[in-house]
Amino acid sequence: MLETGIRLHGTALEEEDFKTHRVFYTTDIPKLQYAWDCGVAMGHYLKGLKQGKLLGTYCKKCKRTVIPPRVFCELCFRNMDKWVELKDTGIVNTFSICYVTWDMKKLIYPEIPAVIEIDGASKGKGILHLLAEVDPKQVKLGMKVKAVWKPKSEREGSILDIKYFKPI
Amino acid sequence: MNQNVAIIGIGYTVPKPKTPEVSYKEMTYLAAQMAYKEAKISPKEVESFVTAAEDLHEGTSIFDEYTPDQLGAVQKPMHTVSGDGIQGIIAAALQIMTGAFDLIVVEGHSKASNIVTPTYVLNYALDPVINRPLNINPHYIAGLEMRAYMQDSKTSEEDVANVVAHNLTRAALNKLAPYGAKISPKKVLSSEPLFEPIRKLHMPQTSDAAYVVVLASERIAKKKVKPVWISGMSFCSDSPTLETRDWTTSISTQIAAEKAYQQAGIKNPAAEIDVFEIDDSFGYKQLQHLEALKVYEKGKAKNIFENGDKQKLSTRVNPSGGTLGVGWMHEATGLHKVLEVVSQLKGKKGKAQIKKAKVGLAQAWRGLPTTTCAVVILKNQK
């Protein structure tokens, strides 16, 4: 009991109690919409994807090529020096095998998100995407993979212009 | 204060209604470069970083995860203050005052133009059970407050229109104010009623910009050119409840100001402070805040435009054009006010320069529907 004299005691609730409005509740569906300015770095990156290219940037001071690109080097804090077109191949840096959906329903075919270190980029620099056309049990760190692109007419300047990466 | 703290550099991008040419990261990088250049430091020397940001305004949760790169803060302490940038400055200054840090950077930015449903985002600041179900555009809260303030202080709609017209007209002289325009009080009064007594021209418009502020302990600051010293600072929140709050007075500003004045040794703010950059959202807030700041007695702020403004407060309050002229920038709003005050204290404001400005005050309101305000007093001499 609180000092105010109000008794606090629990009452078990069933789903039926909500359906029949035996308990009070309110529903709120968010309407939160954003249109993020992609700016110089992401703008070029997405444009490159539409053209079927993977673009990175190079810092001559740190001798690093990074992808996704940025216009400044976060380590030496100066402008990047040049754009670099990279291959659409790389190696699997790390991956997970997902057997359940957002709401924890079992998937028939697991999804395999992976970080793919892109050929030509500095060690550890790569992009996050999905692996497919592969038996999940066969995926290994260091496995060579290649991008599978959407047909040119269907690309729209999105990370989804690459459908997935597959082993080569 | 037991440890002196100074601003030794400020970088910014010019506020604009839209900034599609840069991402928020690129915008902040530009501001950071400018700030570090002015402070003559490398980000490697900075010991801790603060970002003033609200996840719902960014559209990204745990937003401080996304701020290190563009500040040169990779592998450094970084935390978010979910409040106005002046609260961020105070958080950083307090870290320096512990004696554990000498150099701290505060970042705040606005990409307000990227929020497609701003009114719905604003509605998320209201109580979900007893306020949101009414399902009204939440700007009505400014209407409720303006009406209660006007009644209590015997302020007329004409008085409020004078503030709006004055600030927008002054903003026309400020290169950093995108909404400057020569507008008459009559035009304000004839603008469309939206949330009466709020009219269209009372509404602050939004801007995009980034601000990076470098704060240093006295040990570092005394070696720098023209440091601007923090001589008083405080922030405060009143009760958030719409049903029971005091609608007439900005009590949070009053309490924060009292503490800041005490720290700065200020007894008569109107006489001792040369320049004020304060929140003027919806016009009436400037009057309400001037009274809470004890620049005017209660109900007297409307006299700011009367003949015989011997103290020239109409010139010394919001020479920038205020939030109405510069734009509402969410958490970055107060950082722009700090920039304006620092520029005044350094004599860099051109046509809007207040002569011999030595002491300035920046005050920010957290915006609708809040009762949170922050105050910082700055001096160009220790």
Image (cartoon, grey):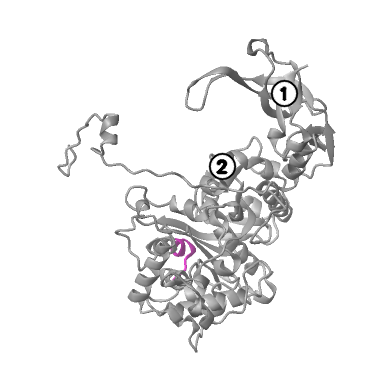
Residue that badge 1 annotates: A165
Residue B380 visible to the viewer? no
Residue type at tag 1: Phe
Give the number of the disc on residue A8: none
State left or right for residue A46 relative to residue A87.
left
Q: Furthest residue to the top?
A: A137
Residue type at tag 2: Thr
State left or right for residue B131 relative to residue B377.
left
Q: Nearer the viewer, mark 1 or mark 2?
A: 1
Give the number of the disc on residue B60: 2
The stretch drawn in magenta includes residue B6? no
Task: Kindly identify the residue that appears in the image at 73 percent across and 20 percent down.
Answer: A166
Dot 2: element:
loop
Stretch in magenta: B260-267
Q: Is residue B66 above or below residue B299?
A: above
Q: Is residue B174 above or below residue B137?
A: below
Residue B292 visible to the viewer? yes
**How far, Cα to Cα, is label 1 from label 2?**
27 Å
**Badge count:** 2
The C terminus of chain B: image quadrant = bottom right
Badge 2: chain ID: B
Q: B201 or B175: nearer the eye?
A: B201
